[in-house]
Image (cartoon, rainbow, N blue to C red):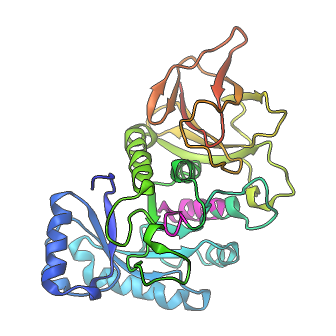
Amino acid sequence: HDAHFNMTTVYSPWYSKDELLDFIKWCARYEIFIIFLELSYVEEYTDCPVIWGHLIKDEPQTKDYEAYSQRCTEYVEKYGKYGWKPFVNYFGFYKFWPYLTEHDGLYSEVPVVSFDHYFGNSALCETGHDNMLHVFECARDLAWRKGQDLWTYIESYNITNWGVNTSKSFRYASYISFSFGSLGILYFQYGDASRNHTSEGDWTKGSLINWDYSKNQAWYDAKEANEEILRLAPIYTQYKNIGTYTVNCNPKYSSAYLEDMYPYFGNVVEDIKDDSNGSVAYLIGCFDKKSSSGHAFTLVNINNLDDITYGDNTESTTTKIKINGNNVTFYRDGYVSEVPCDENGYYTLNMKNGSCWFVTVD
C-alpha cells in the first residue's frame, strides 16, 4: 500500500482460513484488489468488494488452451454472480501468439489479455532476437479484436542479481506498455523467495523486499514509478491507443520489430531530430481522445538502459520534435512540464537514457 500498489495475487492454500480472512480484511481496508491463485475458502468472502477474481491458469501451453478456456466459462457460470472474473496469463514468447491469433474465440470470458515478457535492462536496439515489441503488438491487437483490456507484467524479481537499474527499468517498462495501450501494470514477484532459495543467486537482496520483509532500493524505485503512473492515469485513460511505431530502430534487430508500424500519425508528429546522429531509438504510442478530436502520444527512449540513476542531470540528449497542434501539453514524471518551442515550431526535449514522456495534442 505504501508503494501505491492496488492489486495483489495470493496463493490461498498456503494460508489457514483465519490467516486468509485477516489478509482479506487488510486489503479491503486499503482498497487493494485480490486475485486468488486457487479456489480456497470461497464461501468466506463472497460478499467482499475487493475480490477481483481467480487465476485459472498461468502460462498455459497451447495444447491445453481449449480445456482452460472451458474452465473459464464454467468459472463464470458458478462465480460470476459475485462479480468475480477469471484470469489467465499467457506466455510472452512469440511462438504462442500465432495460435492465440488464429483461435481468438478462446478465453472470451476473460476480461483481459495478460502476458509476461521482461526487459531487464533491455536490449531492444542491440540484440537480434526475442521479438519483444512484436509480442506487445500481438497482445494489443488480440485485445482489440476481443474487446478486452491489455495487462502487462514487468520484471521485479531477482533483479539485484541480474544487475537491473530499477531507478529506470520500472518506469521504462511501464511506458513501453503504455505505448501499446496497457491498462494494467503488474510486478512479478515470487512470494516464496527466502534465504534458502539459491537456485538463482542470493535472494536476500534480490526483489522489491528482502526475505525478512525489509525494503530495499528497488521497493523505493517501484514506489516512485507507481506514484508517477497514478498521477498520469487520469490523463492517460482519456485516450485510446490506435497504433505504435519506432524511429531510428535498426531493422536487423528483431527485438524492436513491429509488423504494423502505424503510418497515420504524421499529421500529429511531423518530425523528430536529435543531436545523437540517429543513435537514439524512439518508441511512439499513438492515441486518439475518446470524447473529442484530440490526440496524444508516448515518446520513449528505448536504447539499452545504462547504470546511471534516473534523474541524474549529467546526462543529456537534445531532441527536437515538431508537433501539429495549437494546445500541446507535455507530461514528464506525471507532471505537466514546460517545454520551449522555437520559431520553426520545434519543441526541445531532453531524451536522455531512460526518458519517457506523455504528450497531449489538441
Q: Looking at the picture, tell me which residue is in the foreground, 334 or 143.
A: 334
On the rendered structure, is 74 left or right of 58?
Answer: left
**Which residue corresponds to the image point at 61% horizontal and 71% vertical from the top-left?**
92
The outermost residue toward the top is 343
Count the labels in the image: 0
**Which residue corresponds to the image point at 63% horizontal and 30% vertical from the top-left?**
314
Image spot of residue 73 (x, y percent): 39, 83
In the rendered view, tell whether residue 60 sits above or below residue 351: below
Image spot of residue 15 (x, y percent): 23, 85
Residue 266 lies in quadrant:
top right
Q: Looking at the picture, tell me which residue is in the foreground, 93 or 140.
A: 93
Query: The magenta stretch spans which residues?
Result: 136-160
Residue 149: within the magenta?
Answer: yes
Residue 63: within the magenta?
Answer: no
Image spot of residue 221 (x, y percent): 44, 50
**Which residue corresponds to the image point at 80% horizontal and 33% vertical from the top-left?**
276
Image spot of residue 67 (x, y percent): 49, 91
